[in-house]
Image (tube, helix red, strand yellow):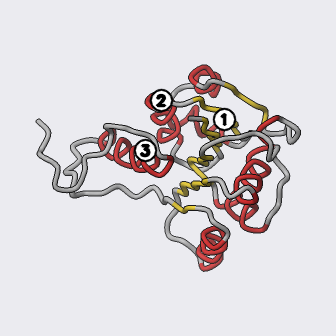
Amino acid sequence: MKVILGITGASGSILAQRFLETADAEIHLVISSNSDQVIQYETGHDSSSFRKMASFSYDDKDVAARISSGSFIFNAMVVMPCSMNTLAKIAAGISDSLITRAAAVALKERRRLILVPREMPLSEIALENMIRITRAGGIIAAAMPAFYTKPRSVEDMVDFMVGRVMDLCGMDNTLVKRWKEEERD
C-alpha cells in the first residue's frame, strides 16, 4: 500500500507521528514549512525524525515531485493534521504547494483523500469548505476521540483517531478498539 502523508501547521502533529510509527505502508511524506515549529513544540522532536520514519520525503515547495502527478499511483492521501488554511486551499482548488497539488491530484484521479482537521470551534467558512471537499470526493475525518473506548491516556485517544484514519485508508490495524469488542486488560 502507498500512502501520501501531508503534515501541516495545525496542532496535532502527535497524530502524524503515531501514524508514521504504526502504518504498515510505503509512506510518501510532505511536511509544510509551517509545521516544523509545531512538531518541535508538541513532540519534542524536529521534523527530521519524522522524515526518517517515512519511506520517501519531499519538500513542500517541490510542486514537480513525482507525487504531484496523476501518473503516480497511490492508495490514499492523508493530511494530518490539516490546517484550515490548507483545507481552504484544497476546497478552492489552489495548488501552490506539494501538499495542495497532491490533494488536487487525489481528487481529480478519484483516489482517497482524507483530511484530518484539528480545530474548534468551526466557522461557517470552514464548514462550507469541508462540505465542498466532501462533495468533491474527499473525506473529512476531524480529530475527535471516542469515549466508548474508555481511554485512560492521551495515547489511547491518539491511537483511536489514528486507527480510524488507517481504517479509512484500508489499512489493517489494532489501534482501534472496535464497538462491542471485548474489554482489553
Residue at 66%, 73% (x, y): give it.
132
Per the model, the C-alpha gap separating discs 1 and 2 is: 24 Å
Residue occupied by mark 2:
24
Tell me the SS state at disc 3.
Answer: helix
Tell me the SS state at disc 2.
Answer: loop
Dot 3: few (<14), some (14–19), or many (≥20) neighbours within 10 Å? Answer: many
Identify the amino acid type marked 2. Answer: Asp
Tell me the SS state at disc 1.
Answer: helix
Of badges 3 and 2, nearer the viewer stands 2
Q: Is residue 24 above or below residue 134?
A: above
Q: Is residue 119 above or below residue 176?
A: below
Residue at 80%, 42% (x, y): give it.
71
Identify the amino acid type marked 1. Answer: Asp
Residue at 25%, 46% (x, y): give it.
177
Of badges 3 and 1, nearer the viewer stands 3
Per the model, the C-alpha gap separating discs 3 and 2 is: 13 Å
Sequence-wise, the earlier of marks 3 and 2 is: 2
Sequence-wise, the earlier of marks 3 and 1 is: 1
Dot 1: few (<14), some (14–19), or many (≥20) neighbours within 10 Å? Answer: some
Of badges 1 and 2, nearer the viewer stands 2
Identify the amino acid type marked 3. Answer: Val
Q: Give me the disc on residue 88.
A: none
Residue occupied by mark 1:
36
Residue occupied by mark 3:
162
Asked which quadrant contains residue 33, the reply is top right
